C-alpha cells in the first residue's frame, strides 16, 4: 500500500519516518511477506495524532514488532506497517525494577537484567522477538511467562486514543493470549523482578539455551511454534506421532527437529505455509479429534 504524498508530509511533521516499498520478507523471521510502506514511530508522544491521521485518511495499518511470530501474505499488501525504531532502546534498572522500551530485544533484556542481578526471566532467553511482542502474546518458555513480571505498562490505547499507563494487574495474561486490544501499541514496561546473583542467573540461562538448541531448529527460518498446545497436550508431539516431520508444500516444511516448527527452506510463499498449516490441522483433527489453534499470527491480504 502506498501512503499518499499529503499524508507522508503530515507524518514527517509528526516526527515519523516513512519508508517506501519495504519487503516484509526481510522483516520477518519466516522470510515470507509482500511489500508495503512502513511508518517508523520515532516519537511516542505523536502516536495518538498519527493513529487519528491514519483513521481519518482510511489507511489500514498493522503494527509489526520483531516479526518473529507473524506469517504475512505475498504481493502488494493492502495495509501499511507501523514499527518502533529498535536501535538503542531505553533500558534502566531502579532497585528491583527494570524499565524497558517495547522495541528492545527480549533476549537482550533478559541479559541486561541478569547483569543487574535481576532474575526470574531465564526461561525467556531464547524467545526471539521484541519486548512489545512478548507482552502482547504473553511469551513464555520453560515454565516462565513475561506477564507475571509486568508491574506497569505504558501503551497507546486504541479504545481511548491516548497514551496511558496500566498496572500489570489490570491486564489478563493467559497462555499466549492477553486482554490487549488489537490496535494497542506497547511502548514501555516496568518489570518487577526477583534479586538473584548474576552467576546463578547465567547458569539458568545456559540450561535453557542448551535445551532449546537440542530441540528446536534455531538456524532455520521459522516463526517458532505454529500452533498453540491444546490443554494438557503437545501439538509438536501429535504432529510427530503422525509421521509428518519433513512433510512439505513448496518450500514450507515441517522441521525434522521439532514438528510444531514449520520452516521456510527456500522461497516459500504464504500460500504454501497456509496450505501446510491447514493440512496438518486437518490430519490432527481426524486422528485426535482436536482442533489446533494458530499460535502464529496470520496477516492475509
Ligand atoms: N515432542 C515430540 N516431537 C516433536 C516435538 C516435541 O515428541 O517434534 C515432545 C517432546 O519430546 C516433549 C513434548 O513433545 O515431550 C513437548 O515438547 P517441547 O518440550 O519441545 O515443548 P512444546 O510444548 O512443543 C513449548 C512452547 C515453546 C517453548 C517450549 C519450551 C508452545 C506452543 N510451545 O513447546 O514455545 O519454547 O515449550 O518451553 O507453547 C513458541 O511459543 O513459539 C514456542 C516455540
Image (tube, helix red, strand yellow):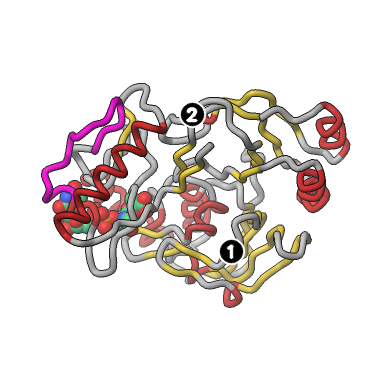
Report the residue marked by disc 2: 74
Compared across the picture, whether 97 is left or right of 293 comes to: right
Residue 242 painted magenta: yes
Residue 180, label in figure: 1
Q: Which stretch appears magenta?
A: 239-254
Compared across the picture, whether 178 is left or right of 257 comes to: right
Q: Is residue 153 above or below residue 49?
A: below
Q: Position of residue 148 (x, y in %)?
A: 48, 71
Task: State which image quarter holds ligand 1.
Answer: bottom left
Q: Is residue 229 above or below residue 19?
A: below
Q: Position of residue 4 (x, y in %)?
A: 79, 29
Which callout, 2 or 1, points to the residue nearer the camera? 2
Residue 6 painted magenta: no
Q: Residue at x 36, y 33 (%)?
A: 221
Q: Position of residue 80 (x, y in %)?
A: 66, 36
Compared across the picture, whether 7 is left or right of 280 comes to: right
Secondary structure beneath dot 2 equals loop
Picture quadrant of residue 288: bottom left
Q: Residue at x 52, y 32 (%)?
A: 27
Between discs 2 and 1, the one toward the N terminus: 2
Amino acid at each position: 500500500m502506498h501512503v499518499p504524498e499529503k499524508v507522508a508530509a503530515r507524518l514527517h511533521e509528526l516526527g515519523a519516518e516513512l519508508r517506501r516499498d519495504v519487503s516484509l520478507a526481510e522483516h520477518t523471521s519466516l522470510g515470507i511477506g509482500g511489500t508495503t510502506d512502513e511508518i517508523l514511530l520515532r516519537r511516542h508522544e505523536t502516536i495518538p495524532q498519527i493513529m487519528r491521521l491514519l483513521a481519518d485518511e482510511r489507511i489500514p495499518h498493522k503494527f509489526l514488532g520483531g516479526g518473529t511470530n507473524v506469517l504475512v501474505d505475498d504481493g502488494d499488501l493492502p495495509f501499511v506497517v507501523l514499527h518502533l525504531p529498535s536501535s538503542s532502546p531505553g533500558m534502566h534498572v531502579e532497585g528491583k525494577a527494570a524499565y524497558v522500551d517495547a522495541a528492545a530485544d527480549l533476549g537482550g533484556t533478559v541479559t541486561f537484567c541478569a547483569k543487574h542481578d535481576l532474575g526470574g526471566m531465564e526461561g525467556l532467553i531464547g524467545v526471539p522477538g521484541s519486548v512489545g511482542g512478548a507482552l502482547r502474546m504473553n511469551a513464555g518458555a520453560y515454565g516462565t511467562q513475561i506477564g507475571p513480571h509486568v508491574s506497569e505498562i505504558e501503551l497507546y490505547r486504541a479504545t481511548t486514543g491516548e497514551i496511558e499507563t496500566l498496572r500489570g494487574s489490570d491486564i489478563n495474561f493467559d497462555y499466549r493470549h492477553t486482554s490487549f486490544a488489537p490496535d494497542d501499541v506497547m511502548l514501555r514496561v516496568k518489570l518487577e523482578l526477583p534479586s538473584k546473583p548474576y552467576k546463578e542467573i547465567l547458569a539458568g540461562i545456559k540450561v535453557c539455551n542448551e535445551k532449546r538448541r537440542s530441540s528446536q531448529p534455531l538456524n532455520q527460518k521459522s516463526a517458532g511454534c505454529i500452533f498453540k498446545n491444546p490443554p494438557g497436550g503437545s501439538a509438536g508431539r501429535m504432529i510427530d506421532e503422525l509421521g509428518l516431520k519433513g512433510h512439505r508444500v513448496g518450500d514450507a516444511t515441517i522441521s525434522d527437529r521439532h514438528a510444531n516448527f514449520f520452516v521456510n527452506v527456500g522461497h516459500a510463499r504464504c500460500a504454501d505455509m497456509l496450505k501446510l498449516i491447514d493440512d496438518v490441522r486437518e490430519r490432527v483433527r481426524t486422528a485426535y479429534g482436536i482442533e489446533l489453534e494458530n499460535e502464529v499470527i496470520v496477516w492475509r491480504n
